[in-house]
Image (cartoon, rainbow, N blue to C red):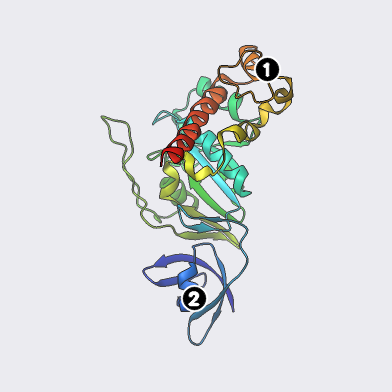
Amino acid sequence: MKAKVIKKVADKFLLDGGCFCSARGSLREKGIFVGDEVEFDKTSLIIEKVLPRKNILVRPPLANLDRMLIVIAPVPKPDFCLVDKLIIFCKINGILPIICVNKCDILSLEQKNEINRIYSPLAKVVFVSAEQMEVDTLRKEIKGVCAFAGQSAVGKSSLINALHGEEKEEVGALAKKTERGKQTTRIVSLYKLSGRDYIADTAGFSKLDEALLNIKARDLDRYFEEFSSYLNRCKYLSCAHDKEIGCAVKAAVAAGEISKERYGSYIKIYQNLKGIKNYEKKS
């Protein structure tokens, strides 16, 4: 029989349908991930085969991800660089990114316009409020296996609860003094919303180290699609769009054709990727 792994508990795997299975030794060594489609023996409850994967994420451990719901909110202050890294991560892994703005009941018109200006050309943007149970626009975007990602305390677990209409995930409170959230999600689990549509809360996506992007600094500009029409206009073919003279990308930023926020993210990520390379050389 075939089924989807929806949770891993110690060396057991909970399959969609409610049964716990073990895995053959060779499969345990190779690894079975939440999101895997597997074949199992209904009598022995042994997983015998993992079917081919669309993608596989090691941290957090998740397979066959179709969509990433990148959650931001007015509070805590949005980390747009994290959003941009997650969009790059999606492009690399064949995942559709969707920007989900939670707590829209306290979102100003100015903030809404800013988010739309920066991200609506790059991804679908939906505005919701878990607190007010206004999640219908988000519900329409849950197709296939979907993971929530974003800073702590933006309301990822609250959104899962609102979509289910019941308490599925522990909800953490925002630390008042630091405005940083306490991480509440410990285990990756898939919850069926309907049919073959699932949602997951993934603690590993509250941060994203550049090393997980697995790309070189010189290739980063390819993942900023708004740069594409300017890349062949730079004075130098090897232009990094940082301090070079005659850079068409920098000129486009100055002219307001590329957002300063996105360009700022590019520079931060570029410098961090260069740092990884320099560290590898020294080691």
Which of the image's four quarters has the N terminus?
Answer: bottom right
Query: Crowdedness of circle 1 by 10 Å Cα count: few (<14), some, many (20+)?
Result: many
Can you say whether 54 is above or below 178 in the image? below
Residue 225 in the image: x percent, y percent? 67, 32
Can you say whether 193 is above or below 96 in the image? below
Of residues 52 and 72, the one nearer the viewer is 52
Can you say whether 49 is above or below 126 in the image? below
Read off the residue under disc 1.
248
Q: Secondary structure at mark 1?
A: helix
Q: Secondary structure at mark 2?
A: helix
Read off the residue under disc 2.
26
Of residues 140 and 76, the one nearer the viewer is 76
Give amino acid for label 1: Ala
Label tally: 2
- Measure the alpha-carbon separation of dots 2 and 1: 53 Å
Query: Crowdedness of circle 2 by 10 Å Cα count: few (<14), some, many (20+)?
Result: few
User: Is the C-beta separation of discs 2 and 1 under 8 Å?
Assistant: no
Which of the image's four quarters has the C terminus?
Answer: top left
**Do we see residue 135 in this rendering?**
no
Residue 158 in the image: x percent, y percent? 42, 46
Give amino acid for label 2: Ser
- Residue drawn at 50 percent across, 34 percent down: 273
Which residue is at the far front?
282
Q: Earlier in the sequence, mark 2 or mark 1?
A: 2
**Do we see residue 145 in this rendering?**
yes
Residue 125 in the image: x percent, y percent? 59, 35
Of residues 145 and 272, the one nearer the viewer is 272
